[in-house]
């Protein structure tokens, strides 16, 4: 409801409007809430909430997909793609890896063809270095802080010069900005850039003030969605469990304890996905400060892939450059100009064009 879905929630918190750039214009789109405990999803086994990790998440998602395809067999032979952003940079490769492994040992296979990963974490070491460099190069970090936290790259091996940036008792903060889109305005009634991830009181559900956002995106819209999805008649229409404060629907789950602290890289799985012939699109909104374009570039560089088509500007049907793309052997990298962490929120037309060309197996238009 904030990104690629078919509907947007209006400032009245009660009515919907159509999203003209919804991705279901180019593909059947299935949204899966995972792990169990996220959104309206739940487990009948309470201990699942204390044992959530990447392995269990991939297993449960895989079992769900098998059962869903049995329930709707008309989709069994369709080409299947997985898309996501942020921590889905781990979820997606792990689910793809699970599908590929089980396709070799089961008669019921999933016709997986490719993955799309936006502003996703890939490899903690290079991702961390990229964030430091991005913040400093965009005037969000002082020279002094950068001197303590900068990374040195040599032969695609990245080392943090000092751990002060990561281990100081007061974590570095660029101040009251939206780190997920460093140039976006904040919601006036909730200026905390992570207000939408908080546990809300009843008053906070109703006092978001409409405002004009960057490129038409309203920074208060998370509040509209929050209120809408906590409306009993909406929950009833969705056949969801009726929730109530303080355990209402929220953008981040407050019941899960996530335990994957030892998984630090997806690079080996990228190698396996490429070896299996999957098509891979890694894209990056270029004004995201959380998993910035520098992080993604450093992580891709660590794969040492041959370049088949050097960096070129791609277009979205107008005179403005929509972003830049590099075609590697086994992987396509694309930036989306003027987009934050949630690319379809800030550049919906460019996001749809990118998706359309990727699904068609074509390079982005130059």
Image: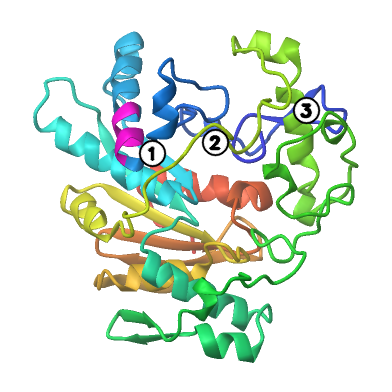
Callout 3 environment at 10 Å: few (<14), some (14 to 19), or many (20+)? many
The coloring applied to the image is rainbow
Label 3 sits on residue: 227
Q: Residue furthest front?
A: 169
Quadrant assignment, res 170: bottom right
- Quadrant where the image shows the N terminus: top right
Specify the label residue 82 is tagged with: 1
Give the CA distance from mark 3 to mark 2. 24 Å
Tell me which residue sits at (45%, 31%) in the image.
34
Mark 3 vs mark 1: which is more N-terminal?
1
Region in magenta = 55-60
For the residue pair 116 and 62, the one nearer the viewer reads as 62
Q: Is 57 one of the magenta-colored residues? A: yes
Label 2 sits on residue: 23
Tell me which residue sits at (70%, 51%) in the image.
194
x, y (%) of residue 104? 10, 33
Callout 2 environment at 10 Å: few (<14), some (14 to 19), or many (20+)? many
């Amino acid at each position: 409801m904030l990104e690629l879905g078919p509907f947007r929630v209006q400032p009245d918190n009660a009515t919907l409007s159509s999203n003209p750039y919804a991705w279901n214009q180019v593909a059947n789109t299935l949204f899966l809430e995972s792990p169990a405990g996220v959104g309206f999803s739940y487990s009948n086994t309470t201990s699942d909430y204390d044992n959530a990790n990447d392995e269990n998440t991939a297993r449960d998602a895989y079992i769900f997909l098998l059962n869903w395809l049995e329930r709707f067999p008309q989709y069994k032979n369709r080409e299947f793609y997985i898309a996501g952003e942020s921590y889905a940079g781990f979820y997606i490769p792990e689910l793809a890896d699970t599908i590929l492994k089980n396709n070799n040992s089961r008669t019921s296979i999933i016709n997986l063809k490719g993955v799309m990963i936006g502003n996703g974490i890939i490899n903690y070491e290079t991702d961390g270095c990229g964030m430091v460099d991005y913040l400093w190069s965009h005037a969000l970090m002082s020279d002094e802080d950068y001197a303590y936290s900068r990374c040195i790259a040599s032969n695609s091996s990245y080392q943090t010069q000092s751990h002060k940036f990561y281990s100081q008792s007061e974590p570095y903060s660029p101040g009251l900005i939206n780190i997920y889109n460093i140039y976006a305005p904040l919601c006036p009634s909730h200026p905390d850039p992570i207000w939408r991830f908080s546990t809300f009181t009843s008053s906070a559900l109703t006092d978001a003030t409409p405002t004009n956002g960057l490129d038409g995106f309203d920074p208060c819209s998370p509040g509209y969605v929050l209120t809408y999805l906590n409306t009993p008649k909406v929950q009833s229409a969705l056949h969801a469990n009726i929730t109530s404060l303080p355990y209402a629907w929220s953008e981040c789950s407050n019941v899960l304890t996530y335990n994957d602290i030892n998984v630090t890289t997806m690079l080996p799985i990228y190698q396996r996905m490429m070896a299996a012939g999957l098509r891979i699109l890694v894209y990056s909104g270029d004004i995201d400060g959380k998993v910035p374009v520098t992080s993604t570039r450093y992580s891709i560089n660590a794969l040492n892939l041959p370049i088949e088509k050097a960096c070129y500007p791609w277009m979205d049907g107008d005179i403005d450059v929509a972003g830049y793309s590099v075609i590697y052997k086994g992987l396509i990298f694309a930036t989306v100009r003027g987009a934050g962490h949630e690319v379809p929120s800030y550049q919906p037309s460019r996001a749809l064009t990118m998706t359309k060309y990727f699904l068609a197996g074509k390079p982005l238009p130059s």
